Image: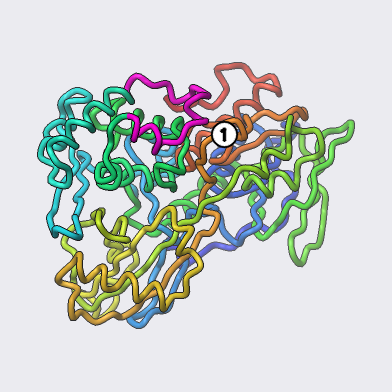
Amino acid sequence: MTSGARRPGRQHPLPSGRPGAAAAVVVGGGLAGTTAALALADAGLRVTLLESRPRLGGLVFSFRRESGVGELSVDNGQHVFLRCCTAYSGLLERLGAAHLVPLQDRMDVPVLDADRMRLGRLRRTALPVPLHLAGSLAGYPHLSPAERAGVVRATLALKGLDPADPALDRLDFGSWLRRHGQSARAVEALWDLVGIATLNARAGDASMGLAAKVFKTGLLSAPGAADIGWSRVPLGDVHDDRARAALEKAGVRIALRTRAQALTRDDDGWQVTVENGPHGSERLAADTVVLAVPQREAHALLPDGTLDGQDRLLDIGTAPILNVHVVYDRPVLRRPFFAAVGSPVQWVFDRTDASGLRALAGQERSQYLALSQSAALEEIDHPVAKLRARYLPELERLLPAARGARIHDFFVTRERTATFAPAPGVGRLRPAARTQAPGLFLAGAWTATGWPATMESAVRSGTAAAREALTELGFPQGQLPQEAA
């Protein structure tokens, strides 16, 4: 089933599942909520999953667009993961979708310098860490020999850091890089090349603790840790269609277009007041509730006194991601993706096959490129015409084959609150899964997973919330969902 042919969701969030089992309500049908709901259902709970949207997947979704060449399936943004993202990989396995979201055999990132029109590559070998990147770095043309040597020294210093150290959370990554001799060029062509895409912030705006987590885990934990994976099908096929099928098979009652309005607790447990369109409002009884929604929405639902310093959730900022979509009348890019330096363009992916473009009659030679622009605060609200005037000439500069090509379609997708802002000090604001209220738990990439706002963090948070809920209900360790390594 494609993302353009949705099954209707179950609209009546009434308790279901095994008679006599504890009842759980999970609020939010993104990756965190899906993970938590599956884990709770696997343990035998009667689970209801509430989602205010007409689909699952949260901020990882697809939609259909009628373009100048026909109807395309469009991802809201380009989402990638790494081999070290073991929790997300586990979710893909559970959904039966691992073959749809494959990993590179070995990390290989083409990096094009727009000013010098020179291509470099960041790729690994099978040698042990850190030698697996030595050859690539030695020949990386976008840095001078002195800058490459400086990168090696900074990498060795990074290897000795503990990402969980609170002192690192208070420090910004840019200051640490300057203290370790990194030039502005080294920051742009290497550290920010990776960091902006994974942290959704430039080095000077990012917590050193989160940056250390990214680089130590992705580049210094195992030779293959940074091998890149991305979906070869529309995201909705995986995180809506297949997620919905897995949840229903597990016995989870899914209620789409259903918004939680309030949480109250009495002697019998939790009452979740919901609004579900034409069915009006109703109250659901639950022994356990998992809030898997963004931090501001969670704050609005949490009863007073649920967390120490509860209003600190409002201090966790958000960061936007802009995606620029271009459909050309001819092939202009031979690689599946590349990154750029010396250009406002960050990462470019070929989405021709995943969008269904190549299957459209008469469009066998057309190509669909998606530009993923993280840390896009300055541009997120720019009008489409201004973005077109900025990015089409840049693509022509980077891709000579695009010069003179006809543009069948140009559009943008904007996620203004795509991630939490990984600013210095954010670590102390991120709450754990367990709250002070019995039976109430938090999930979401913004909670205290130790990871930045990634799909991996979202899945880990769902597992953590389910483990805490089942522990409180008295389930033995052997029946708790397994945490990723």
- Residue 187 colored magenta? no
Relative to the observer, which residue lies in front, 246 or 203?
203
Residue lying at 26% horizontally and 73% vertically, measured from the top left: 393
In this rendering, does residue 380 appear at all?
yes
Residue 216: percent from left, percent from top: 34, 28
* Disc 1 packing (10 Å; few <14; some 14–19; many ≥20): many
Relative to the observer, which residue lies in front, 14 or 65?
65
Say if 16 sits above or below 154 in the image.
below
Give the labeled residue for mark 1. 39
Relative to the observer, which residue lies in front, 232 or 436?
436
Residue lying at 33% horizontally and 63% vertically, measured from the top left: 370
Say if 335 sits above or below 269 in the image.
below
Residue lying at 74% horizontally and 51% vertically, measured from the top left: 260
- On the image, which quarter does residue 280 sit in? bottom right
Circle 1: residue type: Ala
Say if 159 sits above or below 29 in the image.
above
Residue 431: percent from left, percent from top: 63, 32
Relative to the observer, which residue lies in front, 133 or 232?
133
Residue lying at 74% horizontally and 65% vertically, measured from the top left: 277
Say if 190 sits above or below 242 in the image.
above
Query: What residue span does the magenta drawing correspond to?
Result: 159-179
Q: Is residue 26 left or right of residue 119?
A: right
Viewport quadrant of the C terminus? top left
- On the image, which quarter does residue 441 sit in? top right
Viewport quadrant of the N terminus? bottom left
Residue 203: percent from left, percent from top: 39, 42
- Residue 171 colored magenta? yes
Residue 107: percent from left, percent from top: 22, 40
Q: Is residue 354 left or right of residue 32?
A: left
